[in-house]
């Protein structure tokens, strides 16, 4: 993170969320070069165009900021992000060089930052005009940038350590103010551009214009949570859900809902969704068989997002989970419970009819989160024959084809396994064998995320087996299918569990559950090490098996 977490956080966070779209390296270099011209010259020229595209007369090649048209709005956003990245990078360098006492470089960086800021402000004013609420920020920012340039120049002409020390503190304070003011100004400018896109969605009747505006908003959501917050505050969720209530725009539902899901990664997005009865809108789309599968899948993605256990407002105190909750706020519980039956029914039906792995993943992820959300969902799922549907899906490579999908399935099964009825359902579907297969899940690549998903699959499969083995019939079936040797292998061989402690604990718990019902299923030496000691002692014994004694 930044060199100073308090004072430079604004500039670094701005830089972090304003990275450019990944493109070919040479093309990226050429694009960046446009924004790294001699900024002193640009400042003197006051951003006058130095070249004109023959196909687009009147638009700047260097600055790229325009005033009208959908594509120009997109270009404005990209230019703002890129130019802000340049300024934020310079400010970050200043913090670092100031700390090192490199006064010549501090002054040079201050001059460049000052010119970049003035150039950006002038370009934006030429393109859009300065809204009244931004003028005070612009004026204050430009004054502080000039003050920074003047004060750093004074430090070049003295060797007085006491003076330099006092100036260092003053410069640090001014630099912090510049960083904060610049971040606020950029947020306002971005909000202004976002408002234009939202007005296009709300006011236009042209499908192409609306589609472009939604596409631009979706692109912005990929630049970090801060931009998602701005979009939500400016009414992006409200506009998109309003569109999703109009049949004439049904062809845009999927794209609009995908954007809503991205915006709802932040609390402001969920709050906006709540205010306009967004959950009811999602339920209507999910239960409408006339809606195309893509739209229903994206509605499922929104449900998955807003019910994520990682959100601070989407977990019920009645949740049933394979892991500890992060929070227990019930802020959004009431409105969701009203549509719980319809949403859960639609999602499990979508799992059953999914045409591909991606659709299944979105629907099952939503269901998995809902089972964390409230235990009532688990009762509804059992009534809907969910165990049969999920286990059948596990046998269908077209739907369940990755560890990520298996993770969702086994999460649902783990939470269902708390209820007594689940044991008989699993036995009826011959579900123990698929569970044991999940215990053997291994990554097909060196991807860390895939490896982590496989660990979660193994852990939750063991948790599910332990819970279901309360039923003697399940325990007996698991022993007959050689569950004990597999669990022992996972305990004793760190490589089998990717050295995961959570998998080890879950497997020890499952092994002890089976041993309690069928003591003869485990040989004496394994019993002495894995069953008889306290759980923590067995854990320490198994976790130390990976140490090298060379």
Image (cartoon, rainbow, N blue to C red):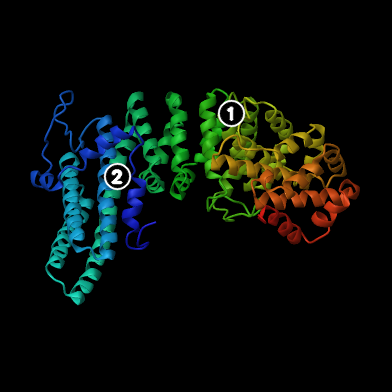
Q: Which mark is residue 191?
A: none
Q: Which residue is mark 1?
A: 357
Residue 191 placement, left or right of 273:
left
Quadrant location of the C terminus in the rendered image: bottom right
Q: Residues within 10 Å of mark 2 (few under 14, many from 20)?
A: many
Instruction: Using the rendered view, name the quadrant where residue 192 is placed.
Output: top left
Residue 306, percent across and down? 53, 44
Residue 529 placement, left or right of 104:
right
Q: Nearer the viewer, mark 2 or mark 1?
A: 1
Q: Earlier in the sequence, mark 2 or mark 1?
A: 2
Give the alpha-carbon distance from disc 2 to disc 1, as whole Å: 36 Å
Query: As displayed, is residue 100 above or below residue 358?
Result: below
Residue 196, percent across and down? 29, 38
Q: Residue at x 84, y 45 (%)?
A: 471
Quadrant location of the N terminus in the rendered image: bottom left
Residue 376 visible to an observer of this rendering: no
Residue 200, percent across and down? 31, 33
Is 25 or 66 nearer to us in this picture?
25
Query: As displayed, is residue 537 above or below residue 372?
Result: below
Is 93 or 525 nearer to us in this picture?
525
Is 198 or 147 nearer to us in this picture?
147
Q: Which secondary structure lies at badge 1?
A: helix
Q: Which secondary structure lies at badge 2?
A: helix
Q: Residue at x 13, y 42 (%)?
A: 47
Residue 162, percent across and down? 20, 77
Residue 20 placement, left or right of 456:
left
Residue 301 visible to an observer of this rendering: yes
Q: Which residue is mark 2?
A: 190
């Amino acid at each position: 993170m930044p060199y100073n977490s308090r004072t430079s956080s604004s500039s670094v966070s701005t830089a972090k969320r304003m990275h450019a779209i990944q493109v070919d390296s040479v093309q990226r270099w050429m694009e960046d070069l446009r924004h790294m011209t001699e900024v002193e010259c640009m400042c003197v020229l006051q951003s006058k165009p130095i070249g004109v595209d023959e196909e687009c007369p009147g638009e700047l090649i260097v600055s790229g900021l325009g005033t009208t048209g959908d594509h120009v709005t997109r270009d404005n956003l990209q230019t703002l992000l890129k130019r802000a990245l340049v300024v934020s990078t310079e400010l970050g360098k200043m913090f670092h060089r100031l700390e090192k006492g490199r006064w010549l470089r501090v002054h040079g960086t201050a001059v460049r930052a000052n010119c970049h800021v003035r150039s950006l402000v002038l370009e934006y004013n030429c393109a859009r005009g300065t809204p009244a609420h931004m003028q005070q920020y612009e004026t204050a920012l430009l004054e502080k940038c000039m003050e920074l340039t003047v004060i750093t120049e004074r430090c070049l002409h003295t060797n007085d350590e006491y003076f330099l020390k006092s100036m260092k503190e003053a410069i640090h304070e001014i630099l912090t103010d510049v960083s904060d003011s610049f971040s606020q100004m950029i947020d306002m400018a971005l909000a202004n551009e976002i408002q234009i896109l939202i007005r296009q969605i709300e006011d236009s009747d042209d499908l192409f214009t609306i589609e472009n505006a939604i596409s631009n908003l979706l692109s912005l959501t990929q630049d970090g949570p801060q931009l998602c917050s701005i979009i939500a505050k400016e009414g992006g969720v409200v506009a998109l859900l309003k569109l999703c209530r109009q049949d004439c725009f049904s062809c845009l539902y999927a794209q609009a809902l995908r954007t809503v899901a991205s915006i709802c990664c932040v609390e402001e997005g969920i709050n906006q969704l709540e205010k306009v009865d967004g959950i009811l809108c999602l339920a209507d789309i999910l239960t409408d068989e006339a809606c195309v599968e893509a739209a229903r899948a994206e509605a499922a993605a929104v449900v998955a997002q807003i019910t994520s256990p990682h959100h601070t407002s989407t977990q019920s105190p009645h949740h049933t989970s394979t892991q500890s909750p992060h929070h227990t706020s019930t802020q959004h519980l009431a409105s969701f419970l009203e549509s719980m039956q319809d949403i859960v029914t639609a999602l499990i039906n979508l799992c059953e009819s999914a045409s591909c792995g991606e659709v299944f993943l979105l629907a099952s992820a939503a269901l998995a989160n809902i089972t964390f959300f409230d235990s009532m969902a688990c009762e509804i799922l059992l009534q809907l024959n969910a165990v049969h549907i999920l286990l059948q899906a596990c046998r269908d490579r077209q739907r369940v084809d990755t560890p990520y999908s298996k993770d969702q399935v086994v999460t649902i099964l783990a939470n269902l396994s708390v209820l007594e009825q689940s044991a008989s359902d699993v036995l009826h579907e011959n579900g123990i064998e698929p569970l044991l297969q999940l215990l053997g899940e291994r990554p097909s690549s060196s991807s860390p995320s895939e490896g982590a998903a496989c660990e979660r699959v193994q852990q939750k499969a063991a948790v599910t087996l332990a819970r279901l083995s309360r039923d003697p019939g399940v325990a007996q079936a698991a022993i007959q299918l050689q569950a004990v040797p597999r669990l022992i292998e996972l305990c004793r061989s760190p490589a089998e569990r990717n050295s995961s402690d959570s998998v080890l604990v879950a497997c020890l718990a499952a092994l002890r559950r089976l041993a309690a019902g069928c003591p003869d299923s485990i040989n004496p030496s394994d019993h002495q090490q894995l069953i008889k000691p306290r759980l923590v002692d067995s854990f320490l014994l198994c976790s130390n098996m990976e140490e090298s004694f060379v």
